[in-house]
Amino acid sequence: MLKIEHIVKQFGKVKALDDVSIRIDRGEFFGMLGPNGAGKTTLMNIIVGYVKADSGSVSFEDKLLSTAENGTRLNFGYVPQEISLYPELSALQNLKIFGSLYGLKKNVMLKSIDEVLELVKLNDRKKDAVKNFSGGMKRRLNLAASILHKPKLLLCDEPTVGIDPQSRNAIFEMLQYLAEQNITIIYTTHHMEEAERLCSRLVIIDYGKIIAEGSLSEMVNMLDKKETIKIKKHSELKSKIKTLESMGRLIEFDLEYELIPDVKFNKMSQLFYSLEELNIPQEFIELSRSTLEDVFLNLTGRSLRD
Ligand SMILES: Nc1ncnc2c1ncn2[C@@H]1O[C@H](COP(=O)(O)OP(=O)(O)O)[C@@H](O)[C@H]1O
Ligand SMILES: [Mg+2]
């Protein structure tokens, strides 16, 4: 459905995108995961035509976007990273402005506005000025505005930044509902939990390059170790760090250490035996299946976390 081929984009000395190619099929919930500055927003902006690539091409349903008629982009809905609403106007007035930008006829527009307000659960607040909305409500309205014209492809650029967990969940559910309606979704995030929860397939982007592509399980299966051991920090742990370091690669986080066991532990039971010998109480030890965070760490040597 969407074919991105060899996109390069340079801003001064910064290569924001460096030969990026992606194919996305109809009906996919496709993720783009990467740390801040990876190039995700730039790629979104190139797809929707806000930014011009230095080279490479984007085509939608086998039509090159650079030469396609203007109407082709009406197949896209875009939820930008920055909320783009008029704060002084009401939710309804905002949606009417978007509706006329998409060229919707009045009765079609009003029906559609009703439907999207219902979906994002803002019907009872439609007459209120947007400036009085919470962060989550603004995000929901931003989403509503992007689907008024019933796009086939919805691009969401970090749509949950700066909102509470409840609103975040509400947005997830709305997007999952849209996906069930057979809308293709591209979702960018720097939170691996979001990508894991939502996306059927994804790419990991770092410094403008795609460093991994596939489903979550395909990516995790590329790792030598499918499990990681987490050891929560506690007062007696300090004296045991040296020994732990001899057992594998030990990575320190704020609240815990992550241990990637040495190959000499070819059985998990041996490793647990050693941890027991070290007198680390079980409640501080957690065995978990590897995550996209581990994939990223493995590929870059860095952490995705902020
Ligand atoms: N308009 C611009 N002018 C100069 N540099 C830019 C511009 N837009 C993005 N960049 C740079 O390109 C890189 C990628 O940015 P961006 O696409 O916003 O990343 P992400 O969305 O993954 O956080 C960053 O280094 C950013 O500073
Ligand atoms: Mg961005």
Image (spheres, helix red, strand yellow):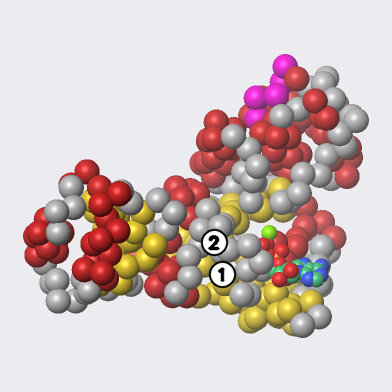
**162 part of magenta stretch:** no
**Residue drawn at point x = 44 percent, y = 54 percent:** 254
Q: Quick check: 150 left or right of 23?
A: right
**Residues shaded magenta:** 120-124
Look at the image and say whether residue 123 sits in the magenta stretch: yes
- The residue under label 1 is 205
Of residues 274 and 80, the one nearer the viewer is: 274
Q: Residue at x 81, y 44 (%)?
A: 84
The outermost residue toward the top is 124
Q: Amino acid at mark 2?
A: Leu
Q: Position of residue 253 (x, y in %)?
A: 42, 58
> Reading the chain from its start, which is encountered first: label 2 or label 1?
2
Query: Quarter containing ligand 1?
Result: bottom right
Q: Is mark 2 within 8 Å of ligand 1?
A: no
Name the residue carrying label 2: 33
Name above or below for residue 286 compared with residue 108: below
| Secondary structure at numbered mark 2 | strand
Disc 1 residue lies near ligand 1 with CB under 8 A: yes
User: Relative to 110, is 264 on the left or the right?
Assistant: left
The reply to whether discs 2 and 1 touch (Cβ–Cβ < 8 Å) is yes
Type of amino acid at the residue the image marks with label 1: Ile
